[in-house]
Image: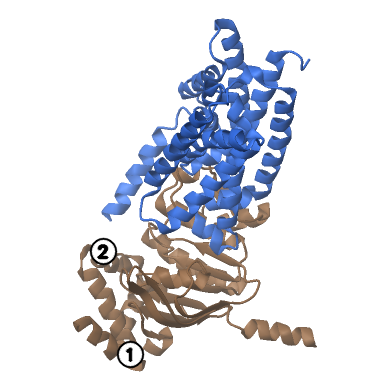
Amino acid sequence: MQNSLIGMLKKTEALVTLENAGVHRAGRWLVRDVSMSVGAGEIVTLIGPNGSGKSTTAKIALGLLQPDEGRASRRADLRVSYVPQKLAVDWTLPLTVARFMLLTGKVSKSGAAEALQATDVAHLADAEVRTLSGGEFQRVMLARAMARKPDLLVLDEPVQGVDFTGEIALYDLIKRIRDEMQCGILLISHDLHVVMAATDRVICLNGHVCCSGTPTAVASSEEYKALFGARAASTLAIYEHDHDHTHLPDGRVMHSDGSVTDHCHPDDGHHHHHAEQRDA
Amino acid sequence: MLDDFFTRAILAGVGVALIAGPLGCFIVWRRLAYFGDTLSHAALLGVALAFLFEVNITLAVFGVSACVSIALMLLQKRATLSSDALLGLLAHSALAVGLVVLAFMTWVRMDLMGFLFGDILAVSKTDIAVIWLGGAVVLAVLAVIWRPLFAATVNRELAEAEGMNPERVNIIFMLLMAAVIAISMKIVGVLLITAMLIIPAAAARRFAPGPEQMALMAAGIGAAAVIAGLFGSLEWDTPAGPSIVVAALGLFVLSLVPAVNRSAAEPAEPDRRTHELRRETRR
């Protein structure tokens, strides 16, 4: 009886919680006043322009950075998998994919093989990590994170260097990982549109939380519908959309920021605050 | 058997090589060559202090090297100087202070060259016992911290996020380094220790399919270099320590020869990769 009660409590308890957390470095706040939580079976996506503190927030959640104000707490005995944004493997390091799978802990052979299979890189098990292309390595990193069977999975730009059909497949896979393992997922992305299908909650950062909400709450937005329809319709449409995205030098940030503000408009009061800040 | 100076030299040298190989891999992977240099330069200060306070030389060298490691870690956290400047500062200051202290002690008659370049032909049975017992402890500790140390080498944040303690294993690793320098100083001398750490590891890289294999191969190549160097030194009457390093260099050069290189077809792969990278960037 008591055990099941504790079990229930554990299930409802958030895996990681930030309360008004902020990190101050070299005379400025990298992020400030960030409150968020990730629960089991939940996908939370952090979006925002470059330098908006997405990675910093993730690092606070992971415990890599201690907040200078506010609090960050993680559930006891939390098993974490982390896919960092960049991981450079030097030539001096002989590291095969199979060995990389065992980097931070023992994983059964079948578990590793299954995970590599799921991310479509099983044929690369004996390849040296440094010879992989960017997309292949992203899949390998995801497979490694998956094979650990984590409670919390933190992914920093997991689709970097992955082609567009691969991108959709990866997001589907991330959703499947959540569904099957019931782990919490904290996802960092600069591309909101493709992420949205699987995400439970979106948090838009720009040095602070400028808006957050469930994608379903903003699904009525015209632009959201258009983007979402395009995503489901064909991969080509997404290709074109992304093409626009990357080829506007400063506009890219403005664009994604702009569309985000639109999304959050219906149910978020902080929006005006955000707009004022940008003007100032 | 141990009464023969040459046998003792081989036993001592091979012992050092077996320890230096695996640790040297981490020196190469983590780009710590200059750090190894710094510690070994500081070893001379340890020698001077050992004479001054009449304590065991190996212990004094270990103590000074450990202090330098910890000083370096603290300075890296606070000071604004870059790591290489800090290392240079510590290395040469410690070396200079060591030489000055030795010069003051006019009553001490010591063979400075022996400490700078090693005196492997003069190792005693006690030295061999220290090398093999100390080495066994060093390798045992390294085996225990191997996984977190390697994970932190690949990516520190990843290791830390997934529940490891990179800070702690880094400190342990630095203490192991200090121990290796203390143990091996007599064999190749403070100026050549870094070579014993780096060259066998570098030679092993091309043939190693994984990190663990690279560590074993580096140990083997180091041992081969010791034996070849000592026989060469006997044959041509060259100084033993430098001869060992020259033999190691020879093995490294051999490892570069394409015919010996198992993965001779490799150059094709980086090409493929740059090509793909370029494609991705363009997109």
Q: Residues within 10 Å of mark 2 (few under 14, many from 20)?
A: few
Quarter of the figure with residue A10 = bottom right
Q: Secondary structure at mark 1?
A: loop
* Mark sitting on residue A246: 2
Residue sticking out furthest to the right: A1
At label 1, the amino acid type is His
**Residue A256 x, y percent position in the rendering:** 28, 74
Instruction: State whether residue B137 is above or below residue A48.
Output: above
At label 2, the amino acid type is Thr
To which chain does the residue with label 1 belong?
A
- Residue at 35% across / 47% down in the picture? B276
Q: CA distance from mark 1 to mark 2?
A: 28 Å
Judging by the rendered image, the residue that carries numbered circle 1 is A270
Q: Sequence-wise, which precedes: disc 1 or disc 2?
A: 2
Is A39 or A244 nearer to us in this picture? Answer: A39
To which chain does the residue with label 2 belong?
A
Residue sticking out furthest to the front: B107
Tell me if B101 is positioned left or right of B147 in this view.
left
**Residue B49 x, y percent position in the rendering:** 57, 37
Regarding residue B203, the answer to whether it shows in the image is no
- Residue at 34% across / 48% down in the picture? B277
* Mark sitting on residue B254: none
**Residue B246 x, y percent position in the rendering:** 50, 19
Q: Name the quadrant of the C terminus of chain A.
A: bottom left
Q: Residues within 10 Å of mark 1 (few under 14, many from 20)?
A: some
Question: What hue does chain B carry in this figure?
Answer: blue
Is B220 or A186 nearer to us in this picture? Answer: B220
Question: What hue does chain A carry in this figure?
Answer: brown
